[in-house]
Image (cartoon, rainbow, N blue to C red):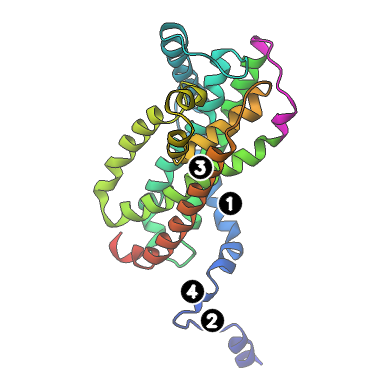
Amino acid sequence: MQAAAVAQAEIIIEPGRSEQNYWRDLWRYRELFLILAWRDVAVRYRQTVAGAAWAIVQPVSSMVVMTVIFGKVAGLPSEGGAPYAVMVFAAMLPWQFFANALSSTSQSIIGNSGLISKVYFPRMIVPMSSVVVSLIDFLVASSILAALMVWFQFLPSWRLLTLPFFVVVAILAAFGPGLIMTALVVRYRDFRFIIPFIVQLGLYVSPVAYSSAVIRGKLGEPWFLLYSLNPMVGVIDGFRWAILGGPSNLSWPGFLASLLLSAVLFVAGVFYFRKTERVFADVI
C-alpha cells in the first residue's frame, strides 16, 4: 500500500512538459502571484517614508508645473471645455501608470534573482505581480482627479463608464514593452539605464501636457496617424474622452492605430520573454 501511495505521488519531469503546460501553470501558481503582488504592495506602502503620499505628490506636482507652463504661459487650449488642470491630470493618470509599470517590470526579474535561481514557476508571474503596485498607485492618484473635479465643479458624463476599458488598454500598452525590457535587462544589465531616458522622452512626445487636438491641427490627419503609433497617444486620448466628456473628441483612426501597436508589442513581449526566460536562472 505504501509503495502504491509513493507511486501515485511521484512527480515526473519530462523535456518540454513545462512548455506544454506553461499557460496552465500560470493559473496553478496564482497563489504565488498573489503573494508576490502583496509583498510588493506592502514594501511600497509600509517600508517607505512617504508611503501612499508619493503616489499623489508625484503626479500632482507634475500637473501643477505643466498647467502653469503650458496652460498659463504658453496659452495652449484645454479640451472638452474642461479646466486645464483637469485635462492634464486626466492624462497624468495613465502616463504615471505606464511609467511606473515599465520601470518596475524591467527590474522585477533581477529583483527576484534568488527566487528565480532556486525553484521552477512560470517566470511571467514576477513582472505580472509588479504591475499590481502601479495599478494601486493609479487607484490612489484617481482620488485626486475626483477632488479636482469637485473643486472645479466639473461633472463627468456617461462616458466615464467606459474608463475600465481604457485601463485595460493601458495595462496592455505597458506590459508588452515591460516584458521586452525585463528580458533585455537580465541579459544586458546596462539596459536598465535606458529605461529612465525612455520614460523622460515619452513624457514629452505623448500628449500629457497638451491636447492631441493641437498636434492634429498642426500636423494634419496623415501625420497625426503616424504620431498615434505611440501607444500612449491612444491611451491618453481614450482617458480624456471618457473623463472629460462633452465636446472632447477621440480620433478613432488614431486610437485604433495605438491599440494595434499595443497589441503587437504585447504579443512580441510575450514571445520574446518566453523565448529567453529558460536561461534566466543561468545568466542571472
Which stretch is magenta?
150-161
- Mark 4, secondary structure of its residue: helix
Quadrant position of residue 167: top right
Of mark 2 and mark 4, the one earlier in the sequence is 2
- Mark 3, secondary structure of its residue: helix
**Left or right side of 189 for 106:** right
Q: Nearer the viewer, residue 169 or 275?
A: 169
Which disc is residue 34 wearing?
1
Which disc is residue 176 wearing?
none
Q: Residue at x 72, y 33 (%)?
A: 161
- Which residue corresponds to mark 2? 11
Query: Between marks 4 and 3, how big is the CA–CA gap?
Result: 31 Å
- Which residue corresponds to mark 3? 258
Which disc is residue 19 wearing?
4
Query: Between marks 1 and 3, how big is the CA–CA gap?
Result: 30 Å
Query: Between marks 1 and 4, how big is the CA–CA gap?
Result: 23 Å
Q: Which amino acid type is shown beneath numbered disc 3?
A: Ser
- Mark 2, secondary structure of its residue: loop
Which corner quadrant holds the C terminus? Answer: bottom left
Circle 4 packing at 10 Å, graded few (<14), some (14-19), many (20+), is: some
